[in-house]
Amino acid sequence: MISLLLRIDTSKEIRLLSLIMSISTKTLGVLTSGEEVFLYFLREDGMTLALSSMGASIISIIIPTTKKGLCDICLGYSTLEAYTQNNGFLGVTVGRFANRIGGSAFKLNGKIYNLYNNENGNSLHGGRRGFDKRVWKSTPRIERNGSFVTFELDSPANDEGYPGNLKASVTYGLNKSHEIIAEYSATVDAPSPINLTNHTYFNLAGEGTGNILSHKARIYASSYAEIDNLLIPTGRLLPVSGTPFDFLEPKTFGRDIVHTGNGYDHCYAIDGEAGTLRSCAEIFEENSGITMRVSTTQPGCQLYTGNSLHNVAGKLGSIYNKYSGFCLETQNFPDSPNRTEFPSSIFGPERPYHEKTVFAFSW
């Protein structure tokens, strides 16, 4: 049993060290498997980014706001044990395939590959033991433009049902422009679906401060993927105009959420050319004064408003419930291995995987 308390708070240590560029490393704990889990604090110009090798996770983003002082905008847990379970995928890197694959199966080169069913007959976020449940090899470094940690993971052929021996890498960094950089790479020796993303829940008013319905959002997407009652895409991209899914002009998450059913859990087709870094979303929270601007090379972005959060024990006594946080999961389209209408998510020896997302903050 792991009982080490993880306190990512506005401590004296963070106040003293957050004014300079630095990386500090701590041992977060040791799993029953004997694997050591590391915690990294990256500090740049007053901001602190905390990362963990458990699930290659973003644990905390602390921003020195003018209105509220130091503000942690990421939902998370207070123990390593909670992160080893983490049914809500708080902060983790998700793979081998983020989001859903319908029927827990796909056909590739004439062969059917069966996956683990972990959500209503479908496979979600990599299956029973996806990349979020594993300890990644981690390497920190400081460069002229910022601080970075590279996480690496090997996924053998038939891991969770997927073909090919895969080597995955994700680098998270914090630079002097108050940007968090996320770069995802993977190589695989046989054709395989790959879809990596980060699953951080944000609350720009501060984690544990209530819901995110008053956050004002703009999403640079003229269409979104239509889904069925099990949240699996039908294959059609529908225009957002005149629907509750229209964020082309800024509006609060709460304005139309009642008309979405259970809340937002939809993939948007980001305008512009996939593969090029372009604007994805912009979120503003008035009480903290924080604005988050997201850009990505990915074709899509899943907006999720924490619809399934229910009495989740979070950091330092916080309790997370429905709408306590939102996710912007830049990614390939859900169920794309089964949908020829969508951009291909099949990669292999002749097609390595590489994507980039940038979260830029101002306050």
Image (tube, rainbow, N blue to C red):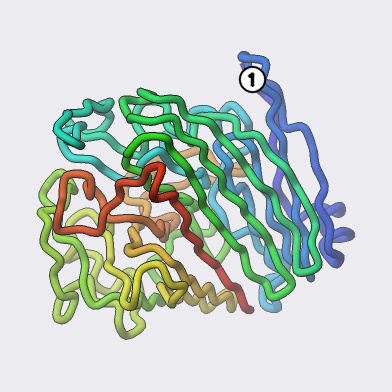
Task: Please identify the quarter of the rendering in which residue 245 is found.
Answer: bottom left
Q: Is residue 61 above or below residue 99?
A: below
Residue 252 position in % (x across, y down): 35, 75
Q: Residue furthest bottom?
A: 249
Residue 181 position in % (x across, y down): 60, 62
Q: Is residue 118 left or right of residue 317?
A: left
Q: Which residue is more in the foreground, 45 or 102?
A: 102
Q: Is residue 44 left or right of residue 188?
A: right
User: In percent of the image, x 68 and y 39: which residue is there?
Assistant: 138
Task: Please identify the quarter of the rendering in which residue 275 is found.
Answer: bottom left
Looking at the rendering, in which quadrant would you find the C terminus? bottom right
Q: Is residue 290 above or below residue 135?
A: below
Secondary element under disc 1, as helix, strand or loop, is: loop
Q: Which residue is more in the foreground, 329 or 357?
A: 357
Q: Is residue 185 above or below residue 163?
A: below
Residue 173 position in % (x across, y down): 66, 58
Residue 20 position in % (x across, y down): 86, 65
Q: Is residue 262 left or right of residue 131?
A: left
Q: Residue furthest front?
A: 350
User: In percent of the image, x 84 and y 57: which residue is there?
Assistant: 22
Q: Amino acid at mark 1?
A: Leu
Looking at the rendering, in which quadrant would you find the N terminus? top right
User: In percent of the image, x 44 and y 30: which residue is there?
Assistant: 165
User: In percent of the image, x 75 and y 47: which residue is there?
Assistant: 140
Q: Is residue 245 left or right of residue 300?
A: left
Q: In this figure, what is the number of numbered marks?
A: 1
**Residue hosting label 1:** 31
Task: Please identify the quarter of the rendering in which residue 122 is found.
Answer: top left
Q: Is residue 355 above or below residue 213?
A: above
Q: Residues within 10 Å of mark 1 (few under 14, many from 20)?
A: some
